[in-house]
Image: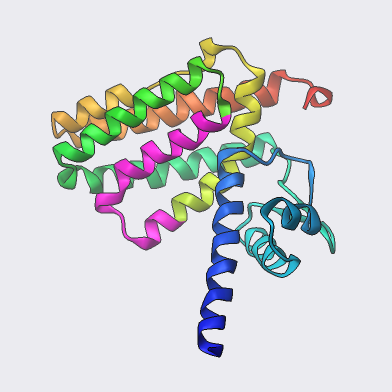
Amino acid sequence: MASEGGKAEKSLKQQVYRTLRARVMSGAVAPGLPITINGVAEDLGVSAMPVREALHRLVADGALEYLDNRRVRVPEMTLSKFEEIIAARIALETLAATRALPHIDEARLERLQIIDAEIDTAYRSDDLLRSTELNFLFHRTLYEPGAGGVLLDLMESIWLRLGPFMRLATAKLEDSYRIDRHAEAMEAIRKADPNALSAAIEADIQDGVGHLGRHFLREVPSAAR
């Protein structure tokens, strides 16, 4: 019985961590706003202990930072930090894409098309939380066939730091700043062209996410953030 209880406790801790991690990555938690242990515990209907442990893990992941012993927050984004994140995304994701290419079958390509269509629907509905979530799902679905745990973990660590800011930046900017390069990536997959796929992924990050973030950080007054 004790063993079963230990497994249940471990499972709950993992569930709380995954739930909070997904919320941070998708932008459900805004940068700068404090997060309290008791507030999260009440929201999830769990005790404070698994929440405290999950928040500690997210701080270690670089997704959150401490304000005091009972509060954390998503760190504010700076231009220098943003440029570093973009460079890391390009380096990791172009590598992941070219490694995945030989292993992407028709079924996975069809899933990518479905996810991309859902992203468009989310944008049209102004559902920024869902669009951010789906965008990361598109990239993960593309990279999974050729990426082991190390590469995926590294990429998700970067996405954790970027997700909250990108939802905030996208909400402040017009639709004309949303540039979709996913169609180019899927065409490169159909042609089995690694160079075109790498270029499409870099353009998606640089011209899409990169453009949004730089515009927001340079043009939007800090008081508006």
At a point 35% along the width and 27% down the height, the residue shown is 116
In this view, the residue in front, 122 or 183, is 122
At a point 66% along the width and 34% down the height, the residue shown is 79
| Quarter that holds the C terminus | top right
Q: Main secondary structure of the magenta part?
A: helix
- The residues colored magenta run 129-153
Rendered image coloring scheme: rainbow
Q: Position of residue 188 (x, y in %)?
A: 21, 29
At a point 75% along the width and 54% down the height, the residue shown is 42
Q: Position of residue 205 (x, y in %)?
A: 45, 31
- Left-right relation of 22 to 108: right
How many marks on residues?
0
Residue 10, quarter of the rendered image = bottom right
Q: Would you place residue 218 above or below residue 92 in this image?
A: above
> Which residue reaches farthest bottom?
2
Q: Position of residue 32 (x, y in %)?
A: 77, 41
In reply to whether residue 105 is colored magenta, the answer given is: no
- Left-right relation of 48 to 187: right
Q: Would you place residue 220 above or below residue 72 in this image?
A: above
Residue 195, quarter of the rendered image = top left
Q: Position of residue 43 (x, y in %)?
A: 71, 50
Q: Would you place residue 47 above or below residue 43 in this image?
A: below
At a point 52% along the width and 53% down the height, the residue shown is 157
